[in-house]
Amino acid sequence: AFKIQNRQSAEGEYRITVSNGSVLRLDGFIKEKNIAIEFLGCAWHGHKCLYRPHEICLNGKTALYNDDTLNERINLLNNENIRTYIFWECEVVKALENNPRMSLFFDELPDIGPLFPRDAFHGGRTGPLSLKCHLEDSAENEYEISCYDVVSLYPAVNFYAFYPIGHPEVWDLNLDINWTKPEDLRPYRGIFKLFIIPPDNLYLPVIPERIHGKLIFHLCHQCAIEIEPGVAKRKQNSYSYETKWCQHDDNKRGFVSTTCSVELELALSRGYRATKVYSIYNWEEWSDELLRPYVQDMMRLKIEASGWPTSALSPENLEQEERLKNEFIEKNQKEYGITLDPSKIARNEGLRYLAKTCNNSMWGRWALRCNLTQDCITSSPIKLHTILNDPKLEVGAIEMLTPDLFAVPYKNRREFVRPHDKYNIILALITTATARVMLYDFMEKIVNDNECKLLYTDTDSCFFVHKRNKKPPFRVGDMLGMMSREYEEWAIISFYTGGCKQYAMKMKHRETGELKYIVKCRGLWEQVDTPLDFNQFRKMVEAYGEEQDPVVLQRTHFQPNWRKGQVTSRTQIRRYTPIYDKGFVDANFDCYPYGYRGEPINDPTK
């Protein structure tokens, strides 16, 4: 085997001064054989698979000019007695499709290429930490399950978080490092692409990784990729400190991650180590007031359209009511800098809904994908021929609407995607990362309290079991970013979850003793012919890891038919079975992150 000197080598790319005095950098160089290896991207270098000779390539030159430059480069290297092997991107892609061993080898290599900011964009943190918690009659008198959620999580982030201003400095470093604390990031602040090694005893991992199409918070990359996705498995024994299900070393446990500084700082403070940094997007200027005026405007509209709160009303004492209303206005002025107009405070459901939606969803517009599928509906043979033969497009299944009218779905190839005028993925990814950090703070406080056990989290909410009448381990209130209690009039006495976005609860009214059942499953519907009720859901969770038949649900829905220009009703069938493949599930139905080697989680009910 020969060593190929490349960009990731300690020496960096091989440089050679050729006969015309220019310095050429080689993608790969085998010194023992005097062989140069050049990998050429088709879109950038103008390969014939994408361009005609006089078309302009992404580098601003014509394909013909790029071809002449390439031939001149090869001749200059030949004059230095260096043999050059050229590999075009399309040829490598085709080889990967035809050679499974080569494809597997490439898949196992770490992604150390350029930093793509969208790789750091992830959604909320959702998933169980225990699949079931059933409080028996004796435990019911001492313990209960509560649900708290963050008041306006994303508006709170937009209101308080720091965002970068201006364009970043792009640093391609490729350096070995040993970052173990938040201060090691200085002077950089922004987005990082690096190799990180998680600790093995952190019950709540910080940095996620997308594996098998799912966002997984783990402590071992190798354990996470070795799982069989979509298969419900449960360990035969309970987790203990002596029972370690992960035996991998640091190199296997670590992974390449693209993340922003707000999440990376938290990770380093919780025991993560960064051993190599590849690229950094660094911003010098940051502000916590970039989005605040917008949030203030939408909050003012929402508060005014919500009407006076009941706490500010006192019909039997008008003088006291006037004082309470003034206090309400002063409180919003002090906390949020919002000046309310008393004459405009009146219930208006439509305006309230509009203001709430704008406040919650504004940031998501910046993350809208730039390469959504478009449809060309045409009867022109020329237009149809142009789209079908454009190598820069990916064309979907063609639909014949009428004998002379066709619908052609298409989208741009990845290399030719251009951002739309509202695109700013940086602001969006910092919003979601800061939201995960805020939720992590609440989760950590619950886990660190010996009288609590965290059961489930869902983006902005936490379910946990605790002693009755116990004060929560976090601040509770109705202001932005605080936790507020859901189902306050009810005591949750049983909680079952079959994975992410799927759970069932049994609740008891605190005063009347009335029982109430709630079943929520993403992808299933409330109005179905055979509803998934609480007892059926409970039995499926209790049989988790065993062979069981799925529950079949069906509903009638409307489906358009393009060809006939009609809308028809059809029966849609969904099959449900509990699945949680984002961590280990032990015999007690407790969930542990892949790679965890710490102490068993505390359960105050046992």
Image (cartoon, rainbow, N blue to C red):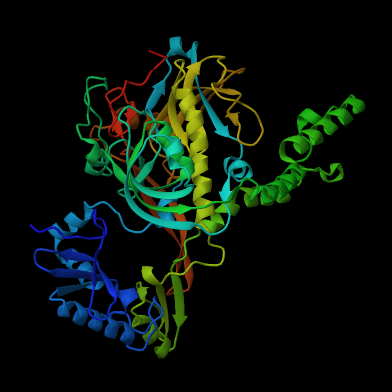
| Residue 291, visible in the rendered structure | yes
362 over 87 or under it: above or below:
above
Q: In the figure, is residue 30 to the left or right of 192?
A: left
Asked if residue 230 lies left or right of residue 365, the reply is left
356, 119: nearer the viewer = 119
Quarter of the picture containing the C terminus is: top left
The answer to whether residue 550 is above or below residue 409 is above
Q: Nearer the viewer, residue 446 or 134?
A: 446
**Is residue 99 shown above or below 589?**
below
In the visual, does 345 lie left or right of 393?
right
In the displayed orientation, state which residue is furthest to the right: 319
Instruction: Residue 604: give x, y in percent of width and height.
Output: 42, 14
User: Residue 404: x and y, percent?
Assistant: 42, 86
Residue drawn at (26%, 21%) of the image:
238
Report whether residue 124 is seen.
no
Q: Residue at x 44, y 48 (%)?
A: 122
Numbered disc total:
0
From the top left corner, tell me how far across and down residue 285 is, in percent: 58, 51
Q: Along the line of sight, which residue is nearer the eye, 90 or 213?
A: 90
